[in-house]
Amino acid sequence: MNNSIAVPFPYNSPCAEGLFDELYYWDTYFLNRGLLKDQLFEQAKNNILDISYLISKYGFMPNANRLDMINRSQPPFFISMVIDYYNNTLDKSIFQSVIKSMNLEMEFWIKNRTVYIDNSLAFQYRSHALDEHYIYMAKEYRERVKKIIDENEDDLIIGKNVLAECESGWDFSTRFNQRILNYLPIDLNSMMYFNLTSLDQINRHFDYQSNYDYKDIAFNLLKILNNKCYKDGIYYDYDFVNNKISPIISMASFYPFKFNIYNDKKAFNYLYNKLIHQYGLSTTEKEDEHNYQWGYPNMWPCLMLIAFDGAINIKDDKKAIDIAKLYINTVDKEFARSNKLWEKYDVNIGTRSILNEYSETEMLGWTAGSYVAMYDYLKELNQ
């Protein structure tokens, strides 16, 4: 049976060939950043319209245009994609083309991915699969990661947490200690604050009537982030079940800088110094035990671009230059060795990652898109 879902326009897949050759959600945001810098506007728009089509079809953007991936979404970058497209083309018609799907997606996250914290809404990653799929995912996770908190843990509980981590894109990491359903992820909630405030403005401009007061939800969400996720200058993931901040310092804490929640340069530099290594920013701090690919010692191109964007937003040109040069030099070093771009890299040896939870992936998607975005910035500054 053909597992792919047809879309109306040509799309870009994350991989040159092999493992990931469908339209993947958050990968496409980083892909589009490169397309826009290269002035390939029509193809960037094709990707946006395909995502809009899938949102209209399912009420949300699936993980990818695959039938086995409609039980979850991925980090909701759609509104950012649309805004980026407009900022690069000044084509206002894009908003009119996709405003309904932007609102549909927002309603999905509000209805299906929220919890009440202090009588206000905050967001978390989840999924909507059948029980048998959760049990299957739990068994696969046991085999792949070989590290379970409690060997007697119910497979249904494990599977629900596993699939929620898949929706986060960080499959898998130490951020949530295999309990992502207990957490408010700082990356997601920073992004949703931006989505809510941006869509409120877009709707007002185009006189579109939404079913929710996005401005009010965003106002209360920001209070939650400041009251629950913030500690000693850094925003962290928050375990609302146990009422405590995650002890894990990770690249996710760059998202508040990326999405204009926070602009403290001292805090940015503190975070940078916690994660910097010879060949990049590590996904998480170094730990005594690490066997997750979304952690030390891996550098993920998408997260390097998030940190880069954060430095730009807080007007720290020196840090933006440092991040861009570090990333480009590492990608160039490995490209000279293997003649390929890769999904992720090792911050200690500067080669493609040696810590993987699936087969090594040749990546011409977010690796290239992030490269082009940072390269273009350095070129403009004659760096």
Image (spheres, grey):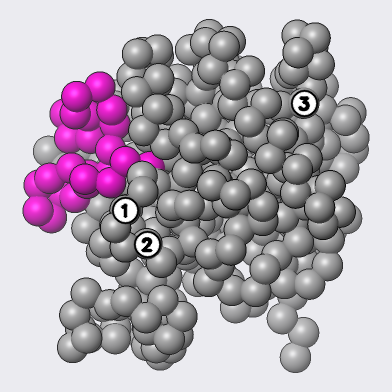
> Residue drawn at (19%, 80%), measured in percent from left and top?
150
> Alpha-carbon distance for marks 1 and 3?
32 Å
Residue at label 3? 375
Q: Earlier in the sequence, mark 3 or mark 2?
A: 2
Does 208 appear in magenta?
no
Q: Quadrant of the C terminus?
A: top right
Disc number lying in front (1 or 3): 1
Residue at label 2? 290
Q: Foreground: 208 or 122?
A: 122
Rendered position, 145 above or below 370: below
Does 225 appear in magenta?
yes
> Residue drawn at (19%, 50%), measured in percent from left and top?
239
> Residue drawn at (42%, 36%), measured in percent from left and top?
275
Q: Quadrant of the N terminus?
A: bottom right
Circle 1 Cα neighbour tier, 10 Å, few/some/many (<14 / 14–19 / ≥20): few
Q: Foreground: 43 or 378?
A: 378
Is 314 positioned to the left or the right of 24 in the image? left
